[in-house]
Image: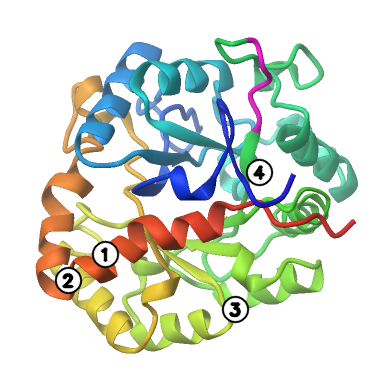
Amino acid sequence: MSGVVRTVLGDVDPATLGRVNYHEHLFQVSPLLPGDELDDERASGLEAASLKASGFETMVDATPMGLGRDPEALARISAATGLAVVATSGRHREAHYAADHPTRSWDATRLAALFASDVQAGMPASDDGIDGPRAVAPDGDPVRAGMLKGGVDYWRISAFERITLDALGEAHRATGAPVMVHLEFCTAAHEVLDLLAAEGVASDRVVLAHADRDPDAGLHLSLTERGAFLGYDGFARPRTRSDAELLQLTASVVAGGGTGRIVLGGDVARATRYIAYGGMPGLAYLGERYLPRLRALIGDEAVDRMLVDNPARLLTLSAPSS
């Protein structure tokens, strides 16, 4: 069904999303992040509630298959907090998967079938049992994904990652779901768009996560000229880029005409950075501490486009093409 946004509690009108955080994680377990597991439903629910209280009505949970997804818990948290949640199918960059992960032997067609099933029929209750029972929401309906995701490494697209991109193209053609791609410091951005375009994924159906890790406004504007969405989600990471640098980057891209292609998120993604897990600064940082500075710099209208209008267009399912 095109023209809707698919949340864990069912399809909704894009106009009802409100302010959207395009990239967070309520559940995530990865061998790259030992000791930083997000796997406690109560704590993740508290963090989701803090995100809503900070001014967001919707979030994308950007955890793809094999990394501790918990679709039923997402649905329960969404129902309890009133925060709409868009779940994710797909496969992350290769480094997140152990050498014996079962999907390493899968081809693109098999992966695409799983991704499309997650969007159309519903996600498995556990990624440990891909062929097992489907996740169900509190009302008994299936919990379905509304976003597809892949990832690539630093100036490198491995064979594993290329198969994932091919599978994302096939799944997108079947479902019309938007595609998120994790980039390492915004490298290989044009190359990813080229590969996806060859698979039938128009650039305006793609969001490039972590684009702001390379604060090159010229590069970013060249990507927006192709229609791609830029995922800005590096806030509160001064060891990489300070908030001041990201504010100036955003102002430069806005001045260059890119306002309509920026979406905002936090990608906090670690227990040690979630207040409910005993860390800091938590999911409320973006709304409470960064956005006031951004509004003061570029104005409410531009920020509201990034939070409301742009993610609504990105997340709306398009008509399948196959």
Q: Residue 232 location, x and y as percent?
A: 36, 62
User: Which contiguous range is marked in magenta?
Assistant: 140-144
Disc 4 versus disc 2: nearer the observer: 2
Q: Which three-letter amino acid code belongs to the residue tagged 3?
A: His
Which element carries disc 4, helix, strand or loop? loop
Labels 1 & 2 near each other (Cβ < 8 A): yes
Q: Mark 2 highlights which residue?
A: 299
Q: Give the vertical position of 115 relative to 310 (above or below).
A: above
Labels 1 & 3 near each other (Cβ < 8 A): no
Q: Give the vertical position of 68 relative to 202 (above or below).
A: above
Tell me which numbered mark, 1 or 4, is placed earlier along the sequence.
Answer: 4
Quarter the C terminus occupies: bottom right
Q: Residue 131 location, x and y as percent?
A: 81, 19
Mark 1 and mark 4: span between their CA atoms? 30 Å
Residue 194 appears left or right of 313: right
Q: Which three-letter amino acid code belongs to the residue tagged 4?
A: Arg
- Label 4 neighbour load within 10 Å: few <14, some 14-19, many 20+: many
Labels 3 & 2 near each other (Cβ < 8 A): no
Q: Which mark is residue 190?
A: 3
Q: Main secondary structure of the magenta part?
A: loop
Q: Which mark is residue 91?
A: 4
